[in-house]
Amino acid sequence: MHASDESRAEPPPSSSDDAAGPPGTLTLVATPIGNLGDLSPRAAAVLAAADAVLAEDTRVTRKLAQRYGLAPRLVSLRDHNEETMTGRVLAQLAAGERIALVSDAGMPLIADPGYRLVRAAIAAGHRVTCVPGPSAATTALVLSGLPPAPFLFLGFPPPKAAARQARFAELAALERAGLSATLVLYEAPHRLAETLHDLAHTLGEDRPAAVARELTKRFEEVVRGPLGALAARYAGAEVLGEIVVVVGPAEGRAEVSEEELDGRLRAALAEGLSVRDAAERVAAETGAARRAVYARALALKGSGRG
Ligand code: SAM
């Protein structure tokens, strides 16, 4: 017997009736990210057999179900009602119902609701399983031509410019401290240009990247190039459709700018840290040489600008 066969918990269901698992099972079901043909036969069988299907926008899921001749009992589960729905779903699972969870597209929980429910179901001892399938993040990653591992999925960056730039600055600091991973981000089409601009500004114009648009759909497109070129291409352009941005890994530690070093030192000194402690912390955060950071911290403190 093959090692993976031994570790398999149980054989796959043999009929559509038991597709939704034994009583009290919560099944996370991946759905297509654009091409309705991408629903797997097992996903369809679970939707058909489940006592209830939790869905974000029930109209979206109904349309998908109809395409497969299914009429599941759909119940809305969204970010704003997940907390209250969780108690109700736990009671249904305890009563032996077989519940499926889908999102509007792709893998539930991936930039979509469901995490709180899954965590609660696990804590309550219910069986939780998954019918895996498409996700825009992994589809874009494998099409990007950038290293597939390690990768860091960031979801949507903050929509407001200041918060987004702060998030990217944190990433840049992590990279200076040694993080080297392909980055995967979701973005709305009307924010693509500013996000690419901020990424290029923070992580470097030369970083290889890709913009994946309308994956699995008629107008699927993957544009690859350095961040600076992509930012220029999409600046002021009207972009339509759904988008994933993929950025190749940082190579080695990037130099930290004087401006950023000073900013970090000022913040540390303003917190009341000694020159030595502030320099230690900023050197660790940025990977910059400790002696140089210490000298700069002393100068800032001495000039009264710390
Ligand atoms: N759960 C989904 C998944 O597994 O990919 C993601 C849901 S999230 C609310 C929606 C975002 O995913 C879109 O704004 C876009 O960034 C990305 N996305 C979804 N479908 C896509 C597609 N067909 N092509 C490109 N990006 C897509």
Image (spheres, grey):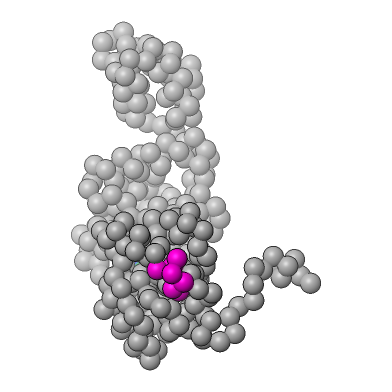
Q: What is the x, y in percent for residue 2?
A: 76, 70
**Which residue in the rendered view is the most extreme toward the right?**
1
Quarter-wise, where is residue 70 in the image? bottom left
Q: Nearest the camera: 47 or 251?
A: 47
**Which residue in the rendered view is the most extreme toward the top?**
302
**Residue 186 seen by the camera:** no
On screen, 46 above or below 177? below
Residue at image point 51% right, 85% down: 17
On screen, 60 above or below 16? above
Q: Which residues are magenta?
A: 92-98
Residue at image point 35% right, 21% down: 268
Quadrant holding ligand 1?
Answer: bottom left
**Residue 259 seen by the camera:** yes
Q: What is the x, y in percent for residue 12?
A: 60, 78
Residue at image point 30% right, 84% down: 63
Q: Quadrant of the C terminus?
A: top left
Quarter-wise, where is residue 299 in the image? top left
**Which residue in the rendered view is the most extreme toward the front?**
95
Q: What is the x, y in percent for residue 136?
A: 41, 67
Q: Nearest the camera: 59 or 206?
A: 59
Q: Quadrant of the N terminus?
A: bottom right
